[in-house]
Amino acid sequence: MEQMNMFKQMIDFNNAAFNNTFNAMVTLQEQMEKTTNTLIDMATWLPEEGRNAIKGWVGTCKAGREEFKSAIDENVKKSEEFFNTAN
């Protein structure tokens, strides 16, 4: 019984650490996106295809980030359910 509580605490701690780190990464990426958009707007020499490629890259990064977060959340939920049903 005590081991199950210890594992639950480990999962909670790791989940909190992941969420804090992930949120810091999201903040950094959002700031870089704003900076990139500002630079794209200022770069009048950059062709439209280049602008679209950069914006597509930013969109792909966002989608990948959200997909990664949902996969982690899903697996944490499965782990919590496992330890809740094991009691």
Image (spheres, grey):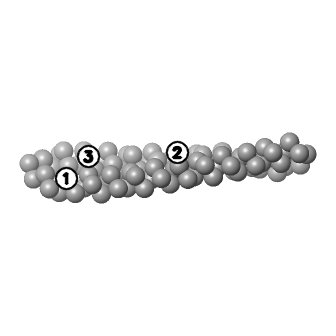
Report if residue 8 is visible in the image. Answer: yes
Gap in angstroms between the C-alphas marked 2 and 3: 21 Å
Dots 2, 3 in contact, CB < 8 A: no
Gap in angstroms between the C-alphas marked 2 and 1: 27 Å
Front disc: 2 or 1: 1
Residue that badge 3 annotates: 54
Mark 2 or mark 1: which comes first in sequence?
Answer: 1
Mark 2 or mark 3: which comes first in sequence?
Answer: 3
Residue that badge 1 annotates: 40
Q: Position of residue 64 (x, y in %)?
A: 45, 45
Dots 1, 3 in contact, CB < 8 A: yes
Mark 2 lies on a secondary structure that is helix
Mark 1 lies on a secondary structure that is helix
Mark 3 lies on a secondary structure that is helix
Q: Amino acid at mark 1?
A: Ile
In-front residue for pair 28/51: 28
Instruction: Name the residue furthest left.
Output: 45
Mark 1 or mark 3: which comes first in sequence?
Answer: 1
| Quadrant of res 6 | top right
Residue that badge 2 annotates: 68
Characterize the local packing of mark 1: few (<14), some (14-19) or many (20 or more) Cα atoms within 10 angstroms: some
Characterize the local packing of mark 3: few (<14), some (14-19) or many (20 or more) Cα atoms within 10 angstroms: some
Q: Position of residue 52 (x, y in %)?
A: 23, 49
Looking at the image, residue 37 sits to the left or right of residue 69; the answer is left
Q: Position of residue 30 (x, y in %)?
A: 37, 55
| Quadrant of res 7 | top right
Q: Residue at x 35, y 50 (%)?
A: 59
Q: Amino acid at mark 2?
A: Phe
Dots 2, 1 in contact, CB < 8 A: no
